[in-house]
Each structure stands twice: as C-alpha cells, then as structure tokens.
Amino acid sequence: MTEKHGILAEMNDRSREVFRRVVESYLSSGGPVGSRSLTRSMSESVSAATIRNVMQDLEFLGLLDSPHTSAGRIPTQLGLRMFVDSLMEIETLSPQDREAMEATTGGNEPGVTSLLDRIGSALSGITHGASLVLTPKYEAAIRHIEFVSLAADRALVVLVFSDGHVENRVFRPPPGQTASSMREAGNFLNALAEGRTLSELRAHLGGEIAAKRQELDGLARELVESGLAIWENPGESHERLIVRGRSNLLDQTDDSDLDRIRTLFDDLERKRDIAEFLELTDAGEGVRIFIGSENKLFSLSGSSLVVSPYMNADRKIIGAVGVIGPTRLNYGRIVPIVDYTAQLVGQLLSGERKG
C-alpha cells in the first residue's frame, strides 16, 4: 500500500488526471483508451502528443498497459488497485437500486434460503454481474426432528432448532416406508439430538446406528441413514453458496476472454473453498475489493470480487454477499450496492426489519 501511495505522490496533477480518465473510460467501455479521445475530456487543453508521453510514463510505472491490438492503453492490476484505493469516487446508492433490493424482502416463499435466493437474483440484476451469497450455517441446538411422507417416492424432514429456525428438506426415502417407520426414525433421532447441533448430531449418528442396529427397525434404519446422506450432501437449494447471474458474465465477455470465464464457471460450479469465501471478510465490517490475482478464490479467471460480510443481532459475522465479474466492474457504483445489501440481509436475519 505504501509503494502505491508513493507512486501516486510522485505523479503531478496532469499525470493523475490522465491516469484517472484512462481508468474511468476503461471501466465504462472495457476497451483501450487512446490519447486523442482524452484530449476532449481533459480539464486543460493539451495535445495528443503530450498525453501520449504521459501515458508512456504511466506505463513505465506499471500502472497502464498497451495491448498489442491497439495504440490505446488499459490499466494494469496495479493501476486498478491504486485507483480503487486512492482515486475512486464512491457513488451514492440510488433510490432505484435501493428499491430494487428492498422489493426482494416481500416475497411469498418462506425460509431464509428463499429470501437469500431472491436477494442474490436482484443483486445480479442491478449490478449486471454474478452475485454470490454465502448463507448462514446454523449451529443452534436441534429441538425437534420429524419425517413427513409427501408421496411414495418423496418425503420431508423437518428440522426445528432451539432458536426457532426451521428447515424443511425434501428427499427420496428408501422404498417401502410406512408411517410407523417414519415415526420410529424421528423418535430415534430426537433422543440423540437433544442439546446437539446438526453437525454434532451428524458426527454422533453413525456410531449410534451401528450400536443400536438390532433395536432399530430395518425401514427406520434406512430412513435415518438416507436422512444422514441428505445432510452430508445437501441439494442445490440448500447449498451454502448461492450463485446467480452467470449469464451476465458472458454478456460482458469477448471471444478472447471466454477461456477465463469458463475457468470461473468451473470454480463456481464446484463451489470450491466456500469457507475461504467467508475468510475474505475477516478484516471485519465493510466492503472489500479483490482484483484479478488478489482474489484467491477465483484467481485463475482473473476476475474481480466485491464482497461484504453480514452480521446477526450479536454483531457476529454469519455470512457474506458479493458481486463477481470482469476487472472492469463499475466499482464506484457496485460498492454501495453490496454494502447496502449486506446491511439489509443482516437486519432481516436479525429480525430488525420486517420482510
């Protein structure tokens, strides 16, 4: 950070303005910026030749680069970082963007996952990037577990936690299940679950099934084991990382960047390093920006990530929201949107705001 500030301090007003306008134009258009186009926007009247000289100096400093296909310049990763840290003007959240996010809180579908899914879809829609929402991991003790038959090949497991949170998970039960076996499976789990979190129950369950194999009815045992498989391998609707708006990334990509986007898609599909996604926010409150290779989760794709944690009523970080896209994201506009979304999610999950 000191080195970047040192570079900025050595630049005169003209160099700073040329640099700022190159970056702003690149973030707006995505293309190289030529000296002739800058002559029309500079605050003082200067020639294209003078601007070219300044751009060459900025290239020497490592702040700009010159693609081989054009005489114009684009910012380097170092240049983007210096712009974001020192020169970027954060926009005020617009009433339209605020209303778009708040409109997601009034949906009819119950449950935290449905709420966060709607918020993720709205976030990708208004930022034109892909949104990432890391849902909370519930570690409250389990109060009650119940199996409910929906059809011959579908059943529901209802998890009620001590803090009042309820999760409903649909799964395919082993064939031949009866009301009696479902009741027995529920009773078996409830006897083990008292005072335990879901992860603690999961760790304890395997041994208990083996120890009480003779006592437990065969159908009930299969049901408990299949329920355990559901908890260990949650379906898409229960993934901790909700990703929405992948198509927006394709809309902003030219042919030369398709491999980069495919790499990013592969990362998102595998949802790898979900735990590290939350670690990106370990510096505490506020929005953080990761550009290109700084982004350890998606560094191979050279994408940028704008991310902010959200907190519960006890001011404990329980999840995060973010926007990922090409390095030419409109950071000044996206930062306040991500910041507001994180605050909104925290308030909703803490019960401070009615949905």
Image (spheres, rainbow, N blue to C red):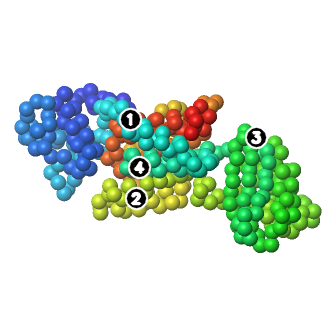
**Is mark 2 in CB contact (under 8 Å) with mark 3?**
no
Distance CA(mark 2)–CA(mark 4): 10 Å
Q: Disc 1 designates what residue? A: 95
19 or 105: nearer the viewer: 105
Q: Disc 2 designates what residue? A: 247
213 or 280: nearer the viewer: 213
Say which of marks 4 and 1 sits in front.
Answer: 1
Examine the rendered structure and indicate whether residue 122 appears above or below residue 343.
below
Q: Quadrant of residue 18?
A: top left
Whole-percent x and y of residue 136? 61, 44
Instruction: Point out the tag, 2 or 1, that comes first from the N-terminus.
Output: 1
Instruction: Point out the tag, 4 or 1, that comes first from the N-terminus.
Output: 1
Instruction: Point out the tag, 2 or 3, that comes first from the N-terminus.
Output: 3
- Number of other residues with Cα within 10 Å of mark 3, as a class: few under 14, some 14 to 19, many 20 or more: some
Q: Amino acid at mark 2?
A: Ser
**Is mark 3 in CB contact (under 8 Å) with mark 4?**
no
Res 162 label: 3
Instruction: Point out the tag, 3 or 4, that comes first from the N-terminus.
Output: 4
Q: Amino acid at mark 3?
A: Ser
273 or 228: nearer the viewer: 228
Mark 4 element type: helix
In this rendering, position of residue 334 left or right of residue 187: left
Distance CA(mark 2)–CA(mark 3): 39 Å
